[in-house]
Amino acid sequence: MRPLQLDVVVADQAASQAQHQQLDAVAQGVYLARDLTNLPAADLTPQTFADAAKALEKLGVKVTVLDEKAIDRLGMGALAAVGRGSDRPPRLVIAHWQGNKQAPTALLGKGITFDTGGYNLKTDGESIVRMTSDMAGAAAVLGTIKALALKKADVNVVGVMAMAENMISSNAYLPGDVLKTAQGLTVQITSTDAEGRLVLADAMWYVKKHYQPRLMVDIATLTGSKVTALGSYYAGLFTEDEALSQSLLQASKTSGEPLWRLPVGDEFANEMKSDVADLRNTGKTAGASTAAWFLKQFAGDTRWAHLDIAGNALASSDKGAQPSGATGFGVRLLTEFVLQPQG
C-alpha cells in the first residue's frame, strides 16, 4: 500500500496539533496491543511480554516483574499452577503510571500466551490456532498504560498482567486438583481450560494487597459462552456497581468499543459449590456469568467490574479502520474510562 499525504487546513494549528498528539497516544496504545496479540506463541512468552512492558520505562512507567520464584513465595498458587506445565514459566507484570497521588485505578489483564486447554484439551483445530490471542486482555492493559504515559495523563493507574502458558506435561495441573489461591480460597479444578479466571484471581489479590486501588476493572478473553451470547458485536460487562457500570457504558459509547451488561448475581453461587474446596472453577450452565461470579469472590470490598472480550480480540476480515487480526479492543475504552472523573 502506498503512503498517502493529506493536507489539512485548520483555524488553530497549535490546538489541532495538541489534539492530534492526544489522539495519537491512544493509537500508539492500540498498535502495541495489536502487535503483541498478533505475535505467534513461539515469539511471545510470559517473559517476552514482560520485556515489552519494560520498554515503557522510558516513558516514565514503573514496571515490576515477578518471576516464578516470587509467585511461589507470595502463595499465588493459582497462577503458579496454570503455568506449571510449560518450560516457559509464568510472570506477574505490573506497569504503574502514577500521574498523580490519588488512590490508583487498577486494570487487570488475562495473559495466557498460549492456551492448549491443558488436559481438558481444545479439540477444535480452528479454535486452538486462535489461542495465541488469549493474552489480548493483558495486551489491552499494557496498551492503555502506554497511551496514558504518552498523554502524560493526570491519573494514577496500575496495570497488572497475569502471564502464563497453559500447556500439557508431566508437571501440568490436572482436573480434580485443589489449588490454594493467594487470597486463601481453595479451588477444585473441574476444567483446566478455565484457567483465565485462576490467574486473574491471584492478580486481583496482589493489586488489592500492594496498591489498595479505588476500583478494579479486569479484561479477558474469558469464555466461549460470552461469544454465544453476544458474538463479536459487544463485549460483556459484569458488575453489580451501578455507578461503575454507567461509567464504563459511557466510555464504551464515547470510544466506539461496545459493551452489553450481563448478570453476575449470587443466583449463580450454587453452580460453583464444591464438596472438596471453597469453589469449583467452572459452573454448569451460564458460563460467562459463572466465570464472572467466580472472579467476584476475589474482589472483596473493592469496587470491581469484569469485561469479557472473547470474540472481540480478533477480526476475521478488514472492517473500516480495523484490519483483520488483532483488534486491540479495550485500549480506547479503558483509556476513556480512566480519564473520566470517578466518583
Image (cartoon, rainbow, N blue to C red):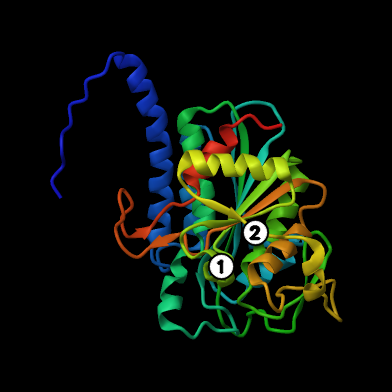
Image quarter of residue 37: bottom left
Label 1 sits on residue: 229
Residue 54 visible (yes or no): no
* Amino acid at circle 1: Ala
Element class at badge 2: loop
Question: Where does the image place residue 127, in percent across and percent down from the top left?
Answer: 45, 77
Disc on res. 262 = 2
- Left or right of 77 in this view: 150: left
Question: Where does the image place residue 39, in percent across and percent down from the top left?
Answer: 38, 61
Q: Crowding at label 2, few (<14), some or many (≥20) Cα neighbours within 10 Å?
A: some
Residue 299 visible (yes or no): yes
Disc on res. 319 = none
Q: What residue lies at 78% left-to-right and 47% top-to-bottom?
A: 209
- Contact flag, marks 2 and 1 (Cβ < 8 Å): yes
Cα separation, mark 2 vs mark 1, equals: 10 Å
Question: Where does the image place residue 226, in percent across and percent down from the top left?
Answer: 57, 66
Upstream in the sequence, badge 2 or badge 1?
Answer: 1
Q: What residue lies at 62% left-to-right and 37% top-to-bottom?
A: 157
- Left or right of 337 in this view: 188: right
Q: Quadrant of the C terminus?
A: top right
Element class at badge 1: helix
Question: Where does the image place residue 166, in percent across and percent down from the top left?
Answer: 57, 73
Q: Is residue 32 above or below residue 176?
A: above
- Left or right of 66 in this view: 180: right
Q: What residue lies at 58% left-to-right and 71% top-to-bottom?
A: 225
Q: What residue lies at 66% left-to-right and 45% top-to-bottom?
A: 245
Query: Which residue is more in the foreground, 125 or 269?
Result: 269
* Amino acid at circle 2: Leu
